[in-house]
Image (cartoon, rainbow, N blue to C red):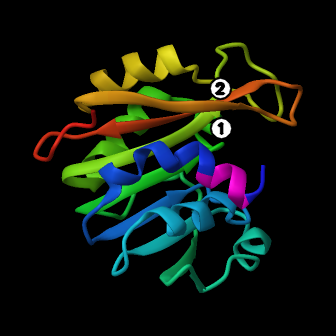
Amino acid sequence: MDVRDAVSLLAPARDQLGGAGPWVDLGCGAGTFTRALAELIPAGCEIEAVDRDASALRRIPREHHGIAITTRQLDLERGPLPWTARRGVLMANALHYVSTAADFLATVRACLRPGGHMLVVEYDTDEPHPPWVPFPVSLSTLERLAIGAGFISCVPLGDRSSRYGGRVMYGALLGTAGGAAPA
């Protein structure tokens, strides 16, 4: 998937992503979805792109589409997440590497400010495909896990065919209380 395709997948959430504040892209890889997010959020926001792969982080620009981007090397499953009061969290093609998605979603929820959002991009399957999709989270599973983790909504954004095995990938927007719920 290239940046244009990633923007297209996330674009239905654009109106919900307004408002200034910091974003975090967890498991950002080389930053395809980091750049897509930068094209969808308003000026004045910034993105911290996080991954355990230092070489991937070096390929991410410091700015894209007028949005400042910083990077941080971090293994997401080792210890608590260090953020609070984030405007939003993006997790594209990364949740399927987390062995305990329910607990992890609750941890991410705790990083968001009231009215914050989480954007998720995943394969729409619950069938593992090691080593690349060891802990899959289908859209229906995400909906159930998100509500259990304290999100008030899980809105599908659309789907795309993946180059990886022809599988379908979906985008979803999770909302928190304290702001307008997504339509």
- Chain part drawn in magenta: 3-7
The numbered dot on residue 42 is none
15 and 58: which one is in front? 15
The numbered dot on residue 135 is 2
* Residue 6 included in the magenta stretch of the image: yes
| Horizontal arrangement in the rendering, residue 49 relative to residue 123 (left or right) | left
Q: Is residue 162 above or below residue 66?
A: above
Circle count:
2
Work out which quarter of the rendered image holds the C terminus and state it.
top left
Q: Is residue 89 above or below residue 145?
A: below
Residue 74 in view of the camera: no
| Horizontal arrangement in the rendering, residue 163 relative to residue 7 (left or right) | right
* Mark 1 residue type: Tyr
Q: Residue at x 53, y 67 (%)?
A: 39
Residue 97 in which image quadrant: top right
Residue 90 in view of the camera: yes
Q: Residues within 10 Å of mark 2 (few under 14, many from 20)?
A: many
Q: Position of residue 108 (x, y in %)?
A: 36, 46
Could you tell me which secondary element the residue under label 2 belongs to? loop
The numbered dot on residue 97 is 1
| Horizontal arrangement in the rendering, residue 104 relative to residue 85 (left or right) | right
Q: Residues within 10 Å of mark 1 (few under 14, many from 20)?
A: some
Q: Position of residue 18 (x, y in %)?
A: 29, 61
* Mark 2 residue type: Phe
Q: Residue at x 22, y 62 (%)?
A: 85
96 and 6: which one is in front? 6
- Badges 1 and 2: C-beta atoms under 8 Å apart? yes
